[in-house]
Image (cartoon, rainbow, N blue to C red):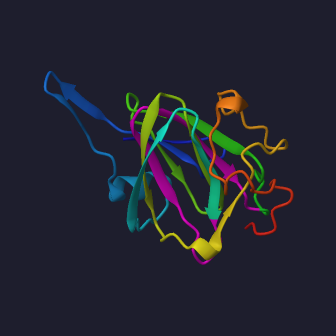
Amino acid sequence: MKFTPQTIPDVILIEPSIHGDNRGYFVETFRQDLFEEATGYKVNFIQDNESKSTKGVLRGLHYQLPPYTQAKLVRVIKGSVLDVAVDIRRSSPTFGQYVAVKLTEENKYQLFVPHGFAHGFVVLSDSATFAYKVDNYYAPKHDRGIAFNDKDLAIDWQLPSEVLQLSDKDKTHPSLANAKDLF
């Protein structure tokens, strides 16, 4: 596995080794000892989640407040997505900046999104199956979000806005500047 810090160094791109032949492939998607050695993060993932979405579905930008913050290790099983992590730690020198990475079934890349980041993704392929590990349970009362189309963030979601599909909840998130509950 190769671990590469992104433009915001706390966000780590993980490129697994893919072993393939005429029968198919094998890939190790997580190894705690290698992860902790390469990143310096001690993680205890306690839940795995999976979603399937069609092209243009945008989920995010989500985060949870303490004590229910979540670190995530995300990947695509089928299809392709643009995955985005936004730094929402007010004391961070990269506050308000983001990392965007294309995750696909072919590249098998994973993105580690630590505590203190809002996270979201948009499906670029006809459909996508998205999987992620989290280190804390979903806590609805602590669930928050940032507007996907925040002009200050200026995220290029790589699809025209008229094809984006959002949940009613995701349509109502405040801009980063107007969010009251940040880190």
Which residue range is magenta in the image? 64-89
Q: Where residue 118 sits in the image (x, y, percent)?
A: 65, 55
Between 2 and 67, which is closer to the camera in this rendering?
A: 67
Q: Is residue 101 above or below residue 65?
A: above
Per the picture, the main secondary structure of the magenta-coloured stretch is strand
Q: Residue at x 65, y 31 (%)?
A: 163
In the figure, residue 110 lies in which quadrant? top left
The residue positioned farthest toward the top in the image shown: 22
Residue 139 visible to the viewer: yes
Q: Residue at x 58, y 49 (%)?
A: 11
Of the 4 image quadrants, the one containing the C terminus is bottom right
Inspect the magenta stretch and tell me whether residue 91 lies in it. no
In the figure, residue 109 lies in which quadrant? top left
Q: Where residue 152 sits in the image (x, y, percent)?
A: 84, 44
Residue 7 visible to the viewer: no
Q: Where residue 84 sits in the image (x, y, percent)?
A: 62, 43
